[in-house]
Image (tube, rainbow, N blue to C red):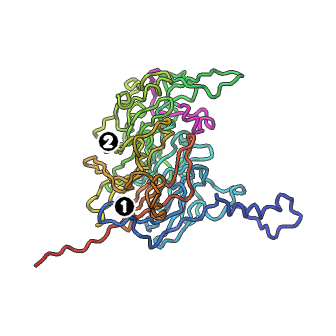
Amino acid sequence: MYMSIDVHNAPRTLPSALRFLPFALTLLLFSPGCRINPQVLKNQPSIDRALVEYPPGFDFRPYVKGLTAPCAIAFDPDGSLLVAESGIDDNDPRIFGFKRDGTFFEVYPRGKSLPFFSKAFRIHAPIGGMVATGGKVFVTHRDENGRGRITAFSYDGKTPPKTIVADLPAQGDYGITDIAVSRLNGRLYFGVGAATNSGVVGLDNLQEGWVKRHPNFCDVPYVDLKLTGFRFDTPNPFASIFGGSDKAVTGPFQKFGASDQSGIPRPNGKPTAAIYSCDQGGGDLKVEAHGIRNPAGLTFTEYDTLYMTNQGMELRGTRPIMDDPDTFLKMVGGEAWYGWPDFSADLRSITDEQFQPPRDLAIRYGYPNVRSLIDHAASHLIPPSPGPLLFGNFRPLAGASKFDFVPASPAFRKYRSDAIVALFGDRAPFATSGRPTVGPTGYKVVRLNIDSHKVEDFIRNTQELPASRLPTKGVDPAKLANALERPIDVKFGPDGAMYVLDFGQMVMKNGHPDVTSGTGKIYRLTGVEQPPATTKP
């Protein structure tokens, strides 16, 4: 419940601080941080193919503008388009929607609020995913302590938000990710990302900030682990003249500066880097698979088979990994292990030459190359086999995100059952330890054929770069604003059109995302009716 104050009828004997309340409220309402609701765009021209390439026989137009760090879209059974804004970079998480006639409505928060007076229910950033089913909107996010949570929201606001799952290990690099609902059994499936880049808490995590907030947090295994004995040296930022070594020694699956465990017991059945499921009321929580570094997108096929995108390890931290690709994986269940952190995202041993970092980057942490952290046999872990699990590869650092499968609609029939995947783009220089990338990576939408595993560009800027980095000389700024920036989600609507969610402008600064407010948008791709073929008599 939000507190309201009638400042116009307040007594003249108000304390001096409160006399300035009207002025303070004015500043609040008109400050840069005050958001204006996004809007559906009407009568927009098609995007120039000289700027953005998209399939022939289709029309591609901007549909919604004015979003800030959006992360997910979904459709409810009535055809309303739901949008979640993640809340990263000190923005507030939001969930809202547009009815089929374009009418805007709020899901969270509802109504105007003053954050410093509010005692209402709050969710904390980042939102990872969203799905609408059974008259509810299920959203993954963090709580006030950084733990992972799933909350169910109603549309009318009359039913209070309900916590479905709580206390998930989400205080590290990646929190709860995407969420999907099974058509067969109605269960919710969702991902929990890894705490670290490659299994060891390091200075990159200190730069991100969570090591100070949660000094005891680290990756959590699903099974009892027997380690191979490697420990990693870094400068100790917590050393001082009052004591403490200048060197911090950290072991895998242990908090920063701890390295005394040769085995890691399974603590509570809630691992990081895993896929979970539960019923829609939150009961019967299960771990379906583990060893999946960052399952950014989850979607079921029409036959109720679950697939996911997985983002590979990066060239950063105490155990930097070179050229680990992003991938498209099939979920087989049975508590299968997908290999992280000892196997790449495409299920190859991380000891392969391809994944070895530059020697000068590796040696500073005590070893000349990357080796396995876990004794697989002693831990009763079966190395993953690509055959039944791997269905597609993307470039390293491509940022493979959310996706959807092409339905049996007339306009898209030639692509039926293919996956359309949003590639967010890289997070350099943070993800590369300051080293330059070779050409642009991601920043587009691709099509993946499940049978052939072939990946092809579907929608991309003609110059490959994101909109904010395209040359501006001689280009109409209004047209330039229609180019892709960072696609993050794709969904097919009940109207047969394909909707692409673009996160908007973001750069990495000192290990943190720096977001440009209002630059996110939604695009709409529709089929163009072709005239019937004619034959000469």
Of the pair 77 and 363, the residue shown nearer to us: 363
Residue 261 painted magenta = no
Residue flagged by tag 2: what amino acid is it?
Leu
Specify start and end residues of the magenta stretch as a single range.
201-229
- From the viewer's side, name the closer residue of 130 and 54: 54
Q: Position of residue 118 (x, y in %)?
A: 69, 57
317 in relation to 449, above or below: above
Q: Residues within 10 Å of mark 1 (few under 14, many from 20)?
A: few
Q: Give me the residue at 39% from left, 68% from top.
A: 46
Tag 2 residue: 390
- Identify which amino acid the numbered label 1 is placed on: Ala
Instruction: Judge whether 4 appears above or below 86 on screen.
Output: below
User: Residue at point 56% right, 54% down?
Assistant: 516
Q: Is residue 133 visible?
A: no
User: In the drawing, what numbered circle is on residue 50?
Assistant: 1
Q: Residue at x 58, y 60 (%)?
A: 108
Which element carries disc 2, helix, strand or loop?
strand
Q: How many numbered marks are there? A: 2
